[in-house]
Amino acid sequence: MTGAVATVITWITSSDITVRFTATMAYGLGLVILTMATAIIVTTRRQAPRAVR
């Protein structure tokens, strides 16, 4: 949520296309990493073997 707000503020306050592009790419890359990490965590929790005592 904070990244989206920062990206919108950057788009409002800056007219430079390079700054806008960089802010948008950073936000998009962050979303990709978050999505991949969440998928990995969910997948490994379902398949984790239980400890045998």
Image (cartoon, rainbow, N blue to C red):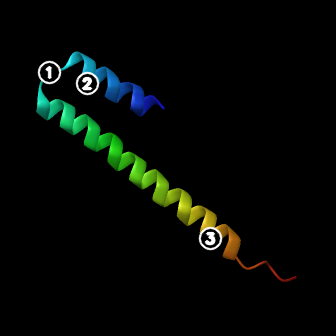
Q: Which label is found at residue 11? A: 2
How much space separates mark 3 and mark 1, taking CA atoms? Answer: 44 Å
The quarter of the displayed image where residue 10 is located = top left
- Helix, strand or loop status at disc 3: helix
Quadrant of the frame with the C terminus: bottom right
Query: Considering only vertical position in the picture, is 18 above or below 28?
Result: above
User: Which class describes the residues within 10 Å of circle 2: few (<14), some (14-19), or many (20+)?
Assistant: some
Residue pictured at 20% horizontal, 31% vertical: 20
- Helix, strand or loop status at disc 1: loop
User: Which class describes the residues within 10 Å of circle 1: few (<14), some (14-19), or many (20+)?
Assistant: few
> Which circle, 3 or 2, is nearer the viewer?
2
Residue pictured at 62% horizontal, 63% vertical: 42
Amino acid type of the residue tagged 2 in the rendering:
Trp
Amino acid type of the residue tagged 1 in the rendering:
Ser
Query: Considering only vertical position in the picture, is 50 above or below 33?
Result: below
**Residue, far bottom:** 52
Q: Do the residues labelled 3 and 1 touch (CB within 8 Å)?
A: no
Residue 39 x, y percent position in the rendering: 54, 62
Residue 37 x, y percent position in the rendering: 50, 58
Residue pictured at 47% horizontal, 60% vertical: 36
> Which circle, 3 or 1, is nearer the viewer?
1
How much space separates mark 1 and mark 2, taking CA atoms? Answer: 7 Å
Sequence-first tag of 3 and 2: 2
Q: In this view, does 34 lie to the left or right of 51?
A: left
Q: Which of 53 and 38 is in front in this view?
A: 38
Query: Label 3: which residue?
Result: 44
How much space separates mark 3 and mark 2, taking CA atoms? Answer: 38 Å
Q: Are marks 3 and 2 in contact (CB under 8 Å)?
A: no
Q: Which label is found at residue 15? A: 1
